[in-house]
Image (spheres, rainbow, N blue to C red):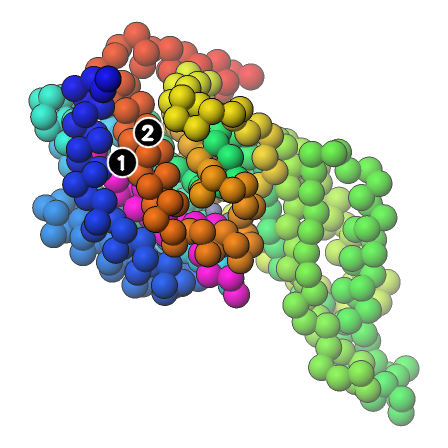
Amino acid sequence: MLTPIDEIISKAIDAASDDLRKLSLLIHGHPELALKEEKACAALTKYLKESGYAVEHGAGGLDTAFVATHGEGGLTIGFCSEYDALPGIGHACGHNLIAIAGVAMFLATVEVAKQCRLPAVVKLFGTPAEESVGGKVAMLKEGVFDGCDLLMMLHPTAGYSGMWHSQCSLSMQIEYFGKAAHAALDPWDGVNAGSAATIALNTLGVLREQLKPSWRMHGIITSGGQAANIIPDYSCIEYTIRTQWERELEVLRARVLNAFESAALATGCTHNVTEELAYLDNQDNSVLGKMYEEIMQKEYGGEPVRGVGASSDFGNLSHRFISLHGMYELAGNHVPNHTKEFTRDAATVKAHERTLFAAKAMACIAARCMVDKDFWERVRKDFDQRKAV
Ligand SMILES: [Zn+2]
Ligand SMILES: [Zn+2]
């Protein structure tokens, strides 16, 4: 038996389902990489404007970011949509579904506020570049989320969870500059930048002995030389480090930067490190997370997923705002993210239906925050306690 508010939410999302399916397939069929999500951003903002909402483009100085806003007074509740794809394998993280989940939660929450005459500001944040440079981190720095009381988003994965402690993550690009020479005629005149990249990765390999089990280091050489008979004058590594907590990230960062520097010293190269914005760990809220997991467990059974190793720029928001990053299983077959199978499943009707169910669950939680003062008080307390740790 649904409560009247649950029914408002369910009806609002079901009414939008066909439009959302079209948006999802359009985004899935035209995978766009980080900060180039023009089609996705245009389609989502067109739909929101045609539905009567005020939309601000270019939020936080990012061309493909947006904010839709409705209402005034009361709590300010924001939802996040993502819509960037991965190189080579398209929407293998299901961000086409995260895009429409955000819209669905936004529409349903607006409908609850309207029909129940509740004062509330409801926002939908279009947040680009989750897979690479961290659009949310840039938007956070520019104050785009200022004034929010609660931020929520959904993500498909291989199971459900309302308490996902993601890893801190820092990506960097390391370039080595040497001197080219003929590898047989006068190799002694060369300074081998390719060797610097090799030594750097070997040094990091040795360092692994002292990593905590929850830490990760991974990377690739994106440029190691042009031909076997030329001593390479340039090489480039893309590298990511991850830790469980923010304070550990600084420790690991210092060690890998030393390793990169030592490779330059050993080979006589110069080097340059470009660091991306760090993603922080996701600080879950146990009151919100528990309510989410109860709804998901009732529908799907099984146990919630704990301790998944991955990172999200939503983590940075969770350090500043009360938040819920809800995970749900994409298609019920435990397929992992970032695989071709995940891309395939992200376009199925089943995944669409599961996305909308999870969006309804999240909107019910947002509605409870608006109407149940005791519940909201417990949510706030949980957040304050976590911050004090
Ligand atoms: Zn991903
Ligand atoms: Zn993702």
Q: Is residue 14 above or below residue 5?
A: below
As for residue 102 lying within the magenta part, the answer is yes
Identity, as a three-letter code, of the amino acid under mark 1: Met
Q: Please give the name of the residue rendered at 36% of the width and 65% of the height, measured from the top-left corner.
A: 30
Q: Position of residue 100 (x, y in %)?
A: 30, 46
Q: Please give the name of the residue rendered at 20% of the width and 17% of the height, measured from the top-left corner.
A: 3
Q: Are marks 1 and 2 in contact (CB under 8 Å)?
A: yes
> Disc 1 marks which residue?
105
Let me know if residue 159 appears in the view.
Answer: yes
State yes or no: Cβ of the residue under disc 2 lies below 8 Å from any atom of ligand 2. Answer: no
Q: Quadrant of residue 271?
A: bottom right
Question: In terms of secondary structure, where does tag 1 sit?
Answer: helix
- Identify the magenta region: 88-108
Q: Position of residue 165 (x, y in %)?
A: 55, 30
Q: Position of residue 6 (x, y in %)?
A: 22, 23
- Indicate the quadrant containing the N terminus: top left, top right, bottom left or bottom right: top left
State the mark number for residue 362.
Answer: 2
Q: CA distance from mark 1 to mark 2?
A: 7 Å
